[in-house]
Image: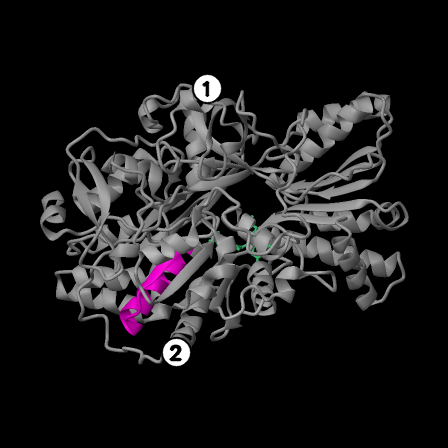
């Protein structure tokens, strides 16, 4: 198979660099001051020339040599927006025959947007922007967003204040289209794309076609597929070209990149850094303290890991399937599986990195793929030498090759690429199946793959719902002779079982799915405990044992500055993590003799005995609270200890009077951390009920009251779904 890659010049993997990562919270007792947020000055001069160290956007675009093209910018945290921008570029190239380029908003000086129109080119701009946190931009678009909002960054456009950018309409003459990526379970749905759209219009730019809005809670793919034909038709009208609707099926697939085998030592051995590999020693010695970020993580020492659950497990019954699973964490008994539930307390040492953080910030941790999953994929790809050194080169046969930029740190071995740089466990996307179909030699397999790529319902039932990965598809359709070319990002953090249907012969098997980063952290823990050997966590050879790439992402989830302000926190399950930090920080102040206001935590889990996180620590703090005159309360809800399920929102209701008193009378803060879809929504509803029952408000009044708390920064959420 490997030779076939050589002779057919097929790219194994292409454009989407995927360092998978998980967000955890960094909460610590001795929190240090955070760096001042980087916001532009209020009266940012217009048309600043090359103020940043970033490369010139104009030089980059001019170097491509196209009088007419689409330029697609992305703001992406976990790769979806980048993936969609790349996909749109390819579709525009295939169907409108107009070249394009995808630009990371962090890599070029975006302030040159204001000068693009002066160049007199026929260029159209596209924005693919994801929203995070409480309506915040992604890390890679934060600088651009802050600049274009004229320092306002978060929040809506400027009101009536002086605004030179608007007065001069610095984007006049630019035409753009925009697709937002978000999730409806969040309060600020697609806030970044909406605000950027309004701002660009205000700055004189004109939108082409409708704004697309993807909802991850429902179907990002479905929303994109609805938008794509609309935007294609708008772009075709804009450029005055016809849409080429001839089927792509009969056309051969021409990958953007091709693999080149390199006859040298690998340069990258698993380090996560763009450009040059960062050696661990350099990190410390060159004192590049401020330069750690998502693209240049710090190799932090993994110092402590402790299991927090006692005897917790989930059971899965699959009576109709034979169960033959070989997974070290799973027990099989006749017709059901038992999967232990575990949650680890983990500490990373930031050492001499100089990285600053505050309680409530996030820590991003990069994981890597397990040896088993790498070998399973290699088998599907029929690669027998994973240690060959490769790099990706633009494929001259693809019309977009001049703008293709490989994000794969290379040269590296195939093993390193599959282990450290690509998320090989993501669900196969529908449009990838169309590419697979082109390579399937068996007519029946080809037909089935074509059906799956054409028929959304069939795809959802047979691939998406069953969470089939690239490797699963390759194993199931052995006649696929080449590999697909996109793998995208995900960071699942659970372990569960589900039945997996083999499409071809109708047989079924049960598969156990492991969350990527959490299972990686578990492997480290198991290795430290001596349960597994070091081959399970391959690391670059010059990075000392137990040093892993991390970075800090600043958040707005902060304790009030005034220590006496009451804080009410709702954080069931792992949502408790930032509140452990909050409580410890308030406790420290109290121990130093300062007056600290009421500090109440609503915590929930299944059972008091099995999955109550930090139980001993909280009990100890509660005992000591009286000594330091701090009103610390931990109000628990154990959903499975009683016949009737009790959740945190029920406890919130029971304490309605106190909560009203803290929030309304004493101007306290309210925090929610954890599941966005059900818990945060139900707690929000309960708070509305409190405003009605205790505060005497009507329904509209209660909603406005919460809105007011939000705008005052006193109702803060750090939630996810
Ligand atoms: C921690 C977290 C916070 C999020 N906050 C929001 C939000 O406030 N509003 C929203 O519309 N979507 C929110 N989302 C959804 C993302 O925007 C969505 O999943 C998007 O597809 C991510 O794109 P990316 O992979 O390019 O980063 C959030 C997702 C996560 C994981």
Disc 2 residue crowd, few under 14, some 14–19, many 20+, Cα 10 Å: some
* Residue drawn at the location 47% of the way across and 68% of the way down: 176
Residue situated in front as seen by the camera: 53 or 404:
53
- The part of the image, by quadrant, that contains residue 568 is top right
Residue situated in front as seen by the camera: 314 or 95:
95
Left or right side of 378 for 3: left
Q: Is residue 15 visible?
A: yes
Q: Is residue 90 magenta?
A: yes
Q: Residue 534: horizontal and vertical position, in percent?
A: 34, 22
Left or right side of 414 for 89: right
Which residue was labeled with disc 1? 285
Distance between the alpha carbons at the discs numbered 1 and 2: 55 Å
Q: Residue 683: horizontal and vertical position, in percent?
A: 71, 53
* Residue drawn at the location 59% of the way across and 67% of the way down: 169
Q: Which residues are magenta?
A: 82-102
Disc 1 residue crowd, few under 14, some 14–19, many 20+, Cα 10 Å: few
> Is label 1 or label 2 in front?
1
* Residue drawn at the location 45% of the way across and 40% of the way down: 21
Q: Is residue 552 magenta?
A: no
Magenta segment, prevailing SS (helix, strand or loop): helix
Q: Is residue 319 visible?
A: no
Which residue was labeled with disc 2? 233
Secondary structure at badge 1 equals helix
Left or right side of 477 for 124: right
Q: Residue 56: horizontal and vertical position, in percent?
A: 43, 50
481 versus 290 height, above or below: below
Secondary structure at badge 2 equals helix
Q: Residue 235: horizontal and vertical position, in percent?
A: 40, 75
Residue situated in front as seen by the camera: 125 or 496:
125
602 versus 502 height, above or below: above
């Amino acid at each position: 198979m490997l030779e076939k890659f050589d002779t057919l010049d097929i790219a194994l993997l292409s454009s989407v660099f995927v360092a998978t990562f998980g967000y955890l919270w960094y909460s610590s007792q001795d929190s240090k001051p955070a760096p001042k947020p980087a916001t532009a000055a209020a009266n940012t001069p217009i048309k600043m020339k090359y103020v940043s160290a970033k490369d010139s956007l104009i030089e980059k675009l001019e170097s491509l040599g196209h009088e007419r093209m689409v330029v697609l910018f992305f703001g992406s945290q976990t790769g979806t927006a980048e993936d969609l921008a790349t996909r749109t570029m390819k579709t525009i190239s295939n169907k409108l025959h107009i070249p394009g380029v995808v630009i990371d908003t962090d890599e070029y000086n975006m302030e040159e947007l204001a000068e693009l129109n002066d160049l007199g080119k026929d260029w159209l701009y596209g924005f693919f922007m994801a929203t995070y946190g409480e309506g915040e931009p992604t890390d890679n678009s934060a600088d651009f967003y802050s600049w274009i909002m004229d320092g306002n960054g978060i929040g809506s456009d400027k009101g009536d204040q002086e605004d030179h950018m608007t007065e001069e309409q610095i984007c006049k003459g630019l035409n753009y289209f925009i697709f937002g990526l978000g999730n409806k379970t969040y309060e600020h749905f697609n806030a970044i794309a909406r605000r950027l759209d309004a701002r660009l219009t205000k700055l004189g730019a004109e939108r082409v076609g409708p704004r697309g809005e993807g909802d991850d809670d429902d179907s990002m793919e479905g929303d994109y597929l609805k938008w794509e034909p609309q935007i294609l038709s708008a772009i075709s009208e804009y450029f005055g070209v016809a849409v080429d609707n001839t089927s792509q099926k009969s056309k051969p697939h021409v990958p953007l990149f091709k693999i080149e085998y390199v006859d040298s030592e690998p340069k990258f051995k698993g380090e996560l850094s763009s450009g040059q590999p960062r050696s661990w020693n350099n990190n410390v010695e060159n004192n590049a303290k401020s330069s750690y970020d998502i693209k240049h993580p710090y190799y932090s020492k993994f110092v402590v890991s402790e299991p927090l659950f006692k005897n917790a497990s989930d059971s899965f019954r699959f009576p109709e399937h034979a169960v033959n699973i070989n997974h070290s964490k799973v027990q099989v008994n006749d017709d059901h599986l038992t999967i232990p539930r575990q949650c680890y307390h983990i500490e990373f040492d930031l050492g001499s990195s100089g990285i600053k953080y505050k309680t409530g910030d996030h820590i991003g941790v990069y994981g890597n793929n397990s040896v088993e999953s790498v070998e399973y994929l290699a088998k599907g790809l029929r690669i027998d030498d994973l240690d060959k050194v490769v790099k990706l080169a633009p494929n001259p046969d693809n019309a977009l090759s001049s703008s293709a930029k490989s994000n794969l740190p290379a040269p590296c071995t195939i093993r390193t690429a599959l282990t450290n740089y690509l998320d090989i466990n993501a669900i196969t996307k529908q449009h990838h199946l169309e590419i697979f179909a082109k390579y399937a030699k068996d007519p029946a397999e080809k037909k089935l793959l074509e059906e799956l790529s054409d028929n959304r319902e069939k795809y959802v039932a047979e691939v998406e719902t069953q969470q089939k990965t690239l490797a699963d598809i390759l194993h199931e359709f052995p006649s696929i002779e080449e590999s697909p070319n996109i793998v995208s990002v995900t960071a699942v953090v659970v372990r569960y079982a589900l039945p997996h249907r083999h499409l071809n012969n109708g047989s079924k098997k049960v598969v156990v799915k492991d969350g990527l980063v959490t299972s990686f952290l578990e492997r480290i823990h198991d290795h430290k405990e001596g349960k597994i050997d070091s081959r399970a966590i391959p690391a670059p050879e010059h990075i000392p044992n137990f040093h892993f790439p991390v970075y800090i992402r600043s958040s707005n989830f902060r304790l009030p500055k005034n220590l006496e302000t009451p804080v009410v926190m709702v954080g069931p399950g792992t949502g408790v993590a930032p509140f452990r930090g909050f409580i410890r920080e308030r406790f420290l102040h109290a121990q130093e003799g300062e007056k600290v206001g009421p500090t109440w935590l609503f915590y929930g889990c299944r059972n008091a005995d099995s999955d109550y996180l930090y139980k001993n620590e909280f009990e100890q703090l509660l005992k000591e609270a009286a000594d330091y005159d701090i009103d610390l309360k931990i109000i628990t809800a154990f959903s499975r200890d009683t016949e009737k399920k009790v959740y945190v929102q029920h406890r919130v209701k029971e304490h309605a009077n106190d909560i009203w008193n803290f929030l309304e009378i004493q101007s306290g803060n309210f925090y929610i951390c954890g599941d966005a879809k059900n818990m945060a929504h139900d707690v929000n509803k309960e708070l509305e009920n409190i405003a009605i029952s205790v505060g005497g408000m009507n329904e509209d009044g209660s909603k406005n009251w919460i809105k007011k708390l939000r705008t005052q920064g006193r109702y803060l959420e750090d939630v996810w779904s």
